[in-house]
Structure formats: structure tokens, C-alpha cells
Amino acid sequence: MRRLIFFGGAGFLLLFVLSFAKPASAASSTMYTWTPSKLYKTASGAAYSGNVNSGTAVTVYSKSGKRYKVKTGGKTGYIYAYNLTSSKVKKEDYFGSKIYKQAAGGPYVASVPAGKMMYIKMEATKNGMYLAHVIGTGYSGYVYKTHFIKPVVKYTWMPSKLYTSATGNSYKKTIKDGQKVSVFNGSHGRYQVKAGSSSGYIYANNLTGTLAKKTVYVSSKLYTTSSHTKYTAVIRPNKQVYVKESTQNMSHVCVVGTAQSGWIYTSHFTKPAPAAGGTTSTPKATAGTSQTGSSTAGGTTATTTTGNTGSGSASGTTTTGNTGSGSASGTTATGNTGSGSASGTAATGSTGAAAASATTAKGLDVSHYQTLTQSSFNLMKRQGYSFVILKATEGTGYTDSKFYTYYKYARNAGLSVHAYHMIGNSTTAPAQHIAEAKHFYQVLAQTKASTGYAFTGYAFEDIEPTGTNSITTTWWANAAPACAGYFLNEMQALGQAKVGIYAGYFNWKSYLEGHTDTWPGNTKIWLARYNTTLGTNADVWQYTETGTIDGITGHFDLDISYDPDF
């Protein structure tokens, strides 16, 4: 009897303990709602007990069909598996984005501005896009991953088209120079950017990380490369430019408010110190750099100087006030071919002015880079210029677009007219240089038909690096004299008796002078040296690249001829 009672007591105690024990449950895990979610009452029904905000942690017990059984905020229910993510990731959209329905792009459900915060479903990343929900809205869909990378600030140093895509030619508008943009990523040479409220693509080389705005104090040629061999325009003094980069004493710039860009000498940003007594001196410029002109105090008496044979120079200044002409009345320079020079300058301080003596003639050389009219050439003639050398051709196929027009204008004005051909290729093969000579000759031969005037001047070959003709120091040292000979001899063989060579002073002295035995005996020598004196024998001296002529806009290469044929 006692055993039964004891057993009964033990059984009762066991039943009592079991009645208060916590029931066993399935293994649970924590997940997060990345988008607002309904908490359904059952695994399949439409009835729900409430809404769960995005970014809420929930305890997940099991999965039934497309829903998870969860517990959140003291409530138990079911949430669609699609609405849950294993980790809570919150990101800022720095770009401003379209919310696409599919990871392949295409139709989109909404556009959101930059700065919006989103929850990301990391495990659903596809095709470079996140599956995201815009916090505080009902928008969910795919957004480009790159839009969540904090952008780099860059600046347009020149006017830039805002393209609609990374590869197409259509664009929305042009962004002005000096504008700050947010850069997100690069593709096909363009950056995806935001400029104000507009987004699109801008060429990478139109942007710079730092932007400096500087003043140019000296007339400066805009060279196409930092090797300063070929230029497209001239910047006047006191112009402001944006500087993108600097190297080898050159700076890559764009003239503020224009599309004019190129390389100029970094030294041209240095403001010149004023000279004592208000007189500006003329500095000596080395070859390859621009030289500024000078203004002398009024009332200076012009001086006549007779130099030693081959080196006479006249330094008197004009008191006639012929702006830009630089003709010093009463100044005489005596010297052999190419060495007599007059360095007097006009009282107005025109850039690059030099006086022509009784034994020299003033001229200039131009191409399509200068915008000129018949009146321009008439002004040149009235201001004492007697000759002009026009660019005619380059390589084997290029003809300067203004050659015939300017030839006619110059002849109408009574100027003596000559022409030059820019060497187009540095190959050592004779055939190339012969072909260039034939092209030059054919263009000159058409002058009569195109202008009414036959070509009667000198035909020069311009030998200098251009950035496209691949001229190197090795070519100068080993091939230059022979290649020039091929060209010049072919010109004379075709019937052009008057021929000449143009070169820089350094290249002439280093590689050409003394190696002309294969050239025609009557070859004229035209040298460029931006200095107060030429310092060697030549027939024509180009003494500045930034000369001015009163009444004509722009800058000019100015020359002095020592040859009576000019």
C-alpha cells in the first residue's frame, strides 16, 4: 500500500513539473526587414496583424511556403521571405538614382534625389546593382552600386559637354569652365558626373582635381603639346586662364570663358617688374620663348649707327608714334646678309617691334590661324610692311584654307608674296619628301587660276617639329640636310626656281649650317630667333612670334629681310 502511494506521489510530482516546463521550439535566427512588411496571421492567408518597418530585427523560427514564421515586438506572425535579409545594411545614395524593376535596367518605378538613405538586400546583388529600399518611402528596386560610392570632387578646367551616355554623341548641355562636379566612376574615357542638378558623362581629360586661375602677363602662343612646336592661337596679356597641369616649364591652360586651350610657358604667369623712370626695357628672349616688346620714353632722338661688317645694329627709338610698325625714322643699320639688325622699338610699346633699316625690308608670315581681310593687308602696306610669307601646304595632301584668299589680298595691296610648306614626315625615304614637294608645287601652280595672280615669290620648306611629323634629335643629326635636299631639288626640277629653307636658329647652327652641299646653290635661308639680334648670316630673320600691327587684331610672326628680292 505504501509503495503505491509513493509511486503515485512521484508520478504526481513529475506531472506537476512537466506542466510548467517551456515547450521545445525549432532553432531560431535573426534577420532584418529591408523593406516595410506585413505581419500575416497565417503562412498563407491575407489577414495580417500589423506592419513592420524597414530595418527591423526579427526572430525567425521556420519557413512555410514563401513566408517565414517570425517574432518581432512581442508579436508572432509570418513575413514574406523576399522582404527579409540576413544582414542589416544601410547606405547613402550619393548620386540620385532611378529605381529599376529589374537588375538589367529598363523600366523604373521612381527617381530619387541624391542623399537618400536605403536598406540594401546584399544577397540579391546582380549585374552591378543592389536590390534596395528607399527608407521612408514605398520605393524598392534595383540601383547601381556605383551610386553608393562617395564621389570625388573635380572641376571643369574647360567648357565640357555633358553626354547622356558613356559612349554616345548626344549630350544634354555644355558645362562652363571652372565648375565643380561630383565624379562617380569612369568608362570609355568619360566620367559619370553630377553637375548641379544635372547628371551625365564628361570626358576625363576635361576634368582636373585642382583648379588654379591665373593671369597671363605676356602674349603667349597656345601650343598643342608641352613640346611647344605647333600652336593654334595667341593669348593676349592680362587674360585669365584655368591651369590644369604643369610640366617641363609649360602649363596646360584654357582661357577663361572660351574653348581656347593649349600649353603656354609657365614663366608667362610672372608679373614683370616695372622699370625705373617708367621705361620698360626689352628683355632678350631665348629661342622658343615669346619676347615682350618695349616702350621707350618719348623724346628720344633716333640714332644712326654704322656697324662693323656683318654685325651692325641700330638701337635708336622712333619718335614718330607709328603704333606697332616699329619703323625708326633716321635709323640705319649696315651689315652683311642676315647680321645687320635694327632693335629700335615704337614709342607705343608694341610687342615684338623692330626697326627696318634702309638696307632691310619688313614683313610677316601668316596662315589660316590669323583672321584677316583685304583691309588688313592694306594696313600692313601703309605701315611699311613690304612682304608676306603665307602658309600654303603641309605633308602630301593638306592645303591651308586661306592660302589663295590671302595671296589675292596681299597682291591686291601691293605686297611681295612668298609661300612656305610645313614638312609632314620625318622619314629618310626620298620618295616622301619628293611627294611633298610635288604637292607644294601643284598648289603654287594653281595660284593664277585661283587668284588671278601667278606665283612669283620664294617657296620655303619649313623644317620644324609639329607633334605629328615625328621629327627627333636623331633625325636632325642624321637625316635633316639630305631630306631638305630631296625636297628643294625636286621643287627646282618641277620648275620652281626660287626656293628656301625655314628653321630655328639652334637647329640651323647645330645640324644644317655647313651641310648644304646637296641643296640648290641659290637656296634662301629664313631663320627664327626671338632675340635682340640674329647673330648669324641669313636672308630673312623671324624675330618675334607675338608682334602686333596697329589696327589689326591678333599677334603675328614678324620678319626682317636682308635680300633685295623681298
Image (cartoon, grey):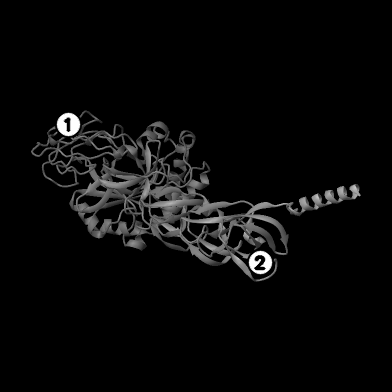
Q: Amino acid at mark 1?
A: Thr
Residue toward you, 501 or 488: 501
Q: Residue furthest front?
A: 1
Q: Residue at x 16, y 47 (%)?
A: 323
Q: In the image, which is nearer the foreground, mark 1 or mark 2?
A: 2
**In the rendered view, does 330 fall on the left or right side of 379?**
left
Q: How many marks?
A: 2
**In the rendered view, does 51 fall on the left or right side of 226?**
right
Q: Which residue is mark 2?
A: 41
- Work out whether residue 278 can be spotted: yes
**In the rendered view, does 32 fall on the left or right side of 556?**
right
**Disc 2 packing (10 Å; few <14; some 14–19; many ≥20):** some
Q: CA distance from mark 1 to mark 2?
A: 114 Å
Instruction: Quadrant for residue 54, please give it.
Output: bottom right
Residue toward you, 15 or 136: 15
Secondary-structure class at tag 2:
loop
Above-or-below relation of 351 to 368: above
Q: Residue furthest bottom?
A: 46
Q: Residue at x 15, y 44 (%)?
A: 348
**Res 500 label:** none
Residue toward you, 317 or 79: 79
Q: Position of residue 512 (x, y in %)?
A: 41, 35
Secondary-structure class at tag 1:
loop
Above-or-below relation of 172 to 302: below
Q: Which residue is mark 1?
A: 306
Q: Residue furthest top?
A: 308
Return the disc, 1 or 2, that comes first in the chain's sequence: 2
Q: Amino acid at mark 2?
A: Lys
Instruction: Quadrant for residue 159, please give it.
Output: bottom left
Q: Position of residue 485 (x, y in %)?
A: 45, 41
Q: Position of residue 387 (x, y in %)?
A: 26, 49
- Work out whether residue 514 can be spotted: no
